Image (cartoon, rainbow, N blue to C red):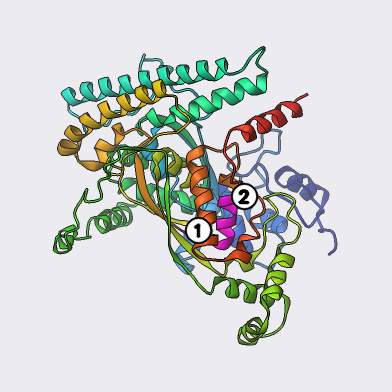
Amino acid sequence: MGAPNFSEEERAIVSAYFSNVDDNVFSIVHLPEETKAALFARYSRSAKSLRRLFLDEFYDSADDLSDSFDATTGKEKASSLFSRVLAEYGDDSVAQLGAVHISFEAVSNLATKVLERPRLMSYLEQSTRYIRYDDRDDTGRYRYHTPAEFDSHDRHLYQRILDELFESYRDLTDLIVNRLSGEVSGEVPQAMRATMRAKALDLSRGLLPTATTSNVGIFGSAQALEQLALHLLSDDLGECRVLGEKLRRELSLTVPALTSRLEREERREPWVDYLRSTRRRIPLQMLDNYQLREGSNFKEERFSSESDVKLVRFDPDGERRVIAAILFESTSLSFDEIEGIVDRLSRTERSEVIAKYCGDRENRRHRPSRAFEATSYRFEVECDYGAFRDLQRHRLMSIEWQRLGTQLGFFESQALSPSEKELYRSAISSVEDSYEYFLKKYGIYVASYMLPMASKVRFQIDLNLRQLLHIVELRTQPQGHESYRMVGQKMFNLLKDVARHDDLASAFVHVDLTEGIDGRLKSIERELNKGR
């Protein structure tokens, strides 16, 4: 491909808005997201190169080429083009071409799960492992959300209960840190101190209420953020509806042309009504005929160190399907022909196909390719809300969860000492008693704010083998939280013992089935050594 034919003046313009002038691989710089999106939308319907298209149809010769650059370059033309493309072609995908960074600050952990539910976006969230939540904000309050639904009496009652819970969290964290420090003789190295702190925060995390506030950063396309705004606006929690309105406002300021439907009430409100109504259409009364009612699965054992995982669905023919998919990529045969070959392979030959396909996986980021998507598994998990919030962020898998309550009991680490367990249980029991009052008065959604993260929740995960490999190897690493490590380890064991997919399980070479915190220590030491 020859070099683009630009005049000297055009080269100066192109160099201001593109990373290079001559190469066939380049990026766009110093242009608003709407202009980028419209430029790419026009790109798909033009024979011109992108930089030529920008010069001919988007660049205004009046634009300033100073160091500051004109942030509105091509924006008016972009808005016009977007409206025309959408009207003439119905091409919603153009809104995928503009992206925005949005920050949500001081939102509850219940709201973070709604924010992070969409799949095709990127998220960053404050960690309960690296941040102690027992400090107070500028107003003198602990960092938690108080629902607007509460009347003044219940607001004060709720705040008193959560203040006491945060104080128990503080006391428990201090107890654990002091105990761990006493178990180490002599001067404590920096890596060990960081390990002990992380371990203490992991063990005390269960006392943090789901109302605990967090900061969430989201990077997503305008289309994905538009959908998020609609889901927030239709949510049962008032906090989420307020966030939805604020997100709508921000999108109208940053990418108005790409999210214009949010500003049209006749389009927005029917959409929101549909999302809201479909969640409430399931006639739960019909379950009475089958003697299935809310709370019928109440666990008598209130505190448990176990996370329950069941493999509720899998393909008994999964290994055969994966082997066939591997061979399909490597041949020109039809799938029927390949399946005939697979059926004639010996067990040793089948194992060899999978082993050669996986190759030498030096680390867990060396993952097998798309043939591992040929079979899938569905797991039902009961674990604490703290672990759930970590697992839920694996966005490309399908996950559905039930409403949070107390009927499944609470997670309690075996690593807590007897005195620590006593404090832990006492704090949770006091909240559980008050929860019933708020549940009856305000319903399950609003009452959930006061439940601690130790509360267990039931959810189902549907994922293919490739996704399972990723989540199991990542979440079983020694530096991970013991609760979600247990979930990952049980998933792996179910793959072997229930599905009996031994050859596929052999690909999981970086799963860690050990216990303890040594891995956390080694991880911190590596990070410290990098900075030297």
The secondary structure that most of the magenta stretch takes on is helix
Q: Quadrant of the N terminus?
A: bottom right
Residue 164, quarter of the rendered image: top left
Total number of numbered discs in the rendering: 2
Horizontal relation, residue 492 to residue 325: left or right: left
Give the residue drawn at x 47%, y 54%.
223
The residue that disc 1 covers is 494
* Residue 97 rendering spot, x and y as whole percentages: 56, 54
Q: Is residue 468 magenta?
A: yes
* Residue 169 rendering spot, x and y as whole percentages: 40, 22
Q: Earlier in the sequence, mark 1 or mark 2?
A: 1
Query: What amino acid type should be assigned to the residue bearing mark 2?
Result: Val
Along the viewing direction, whichever of 241 and 481 lies nearer the viewer: 481
Looking at this view, name the residue that lies furthest to the right. 2
Q: Residues within 10 Å of mark 1 (few under 14, many from 20)?
A: some
- Asked whether residue 250 appears in the rendered view, the answer is yes
Q: Quadrant of the C terminus?
A: top right
* Residue 218 rendering spot, x and y as whole percentages: 51, 41
Q: Is residue 299 magenta?
A: no
Give the residue drawn at x 30%, y 49%.
234
Along the viewing direction, whichever of 191 and 512 lies nearer the viewer: 512
Image mark for residue 420: none
Along the viewing direction, whichever of 283 and 503 lies nearer the viewer: 503
The residues bearing labels 1 and 2 have C-alpha atoms spaced at a distance of 13 Å
Horizontal relation, residue 183 to residue 294: left or right: right
Q: Report the span colored magenta.
A: 462-472
* Residue 372 rendering spot, x and y as whole percentages: 61, 65
The residue that disc 2 covers is 511
Q: Residues within 10 Å of mark 2 (few under 14, many from 20)?
A: many
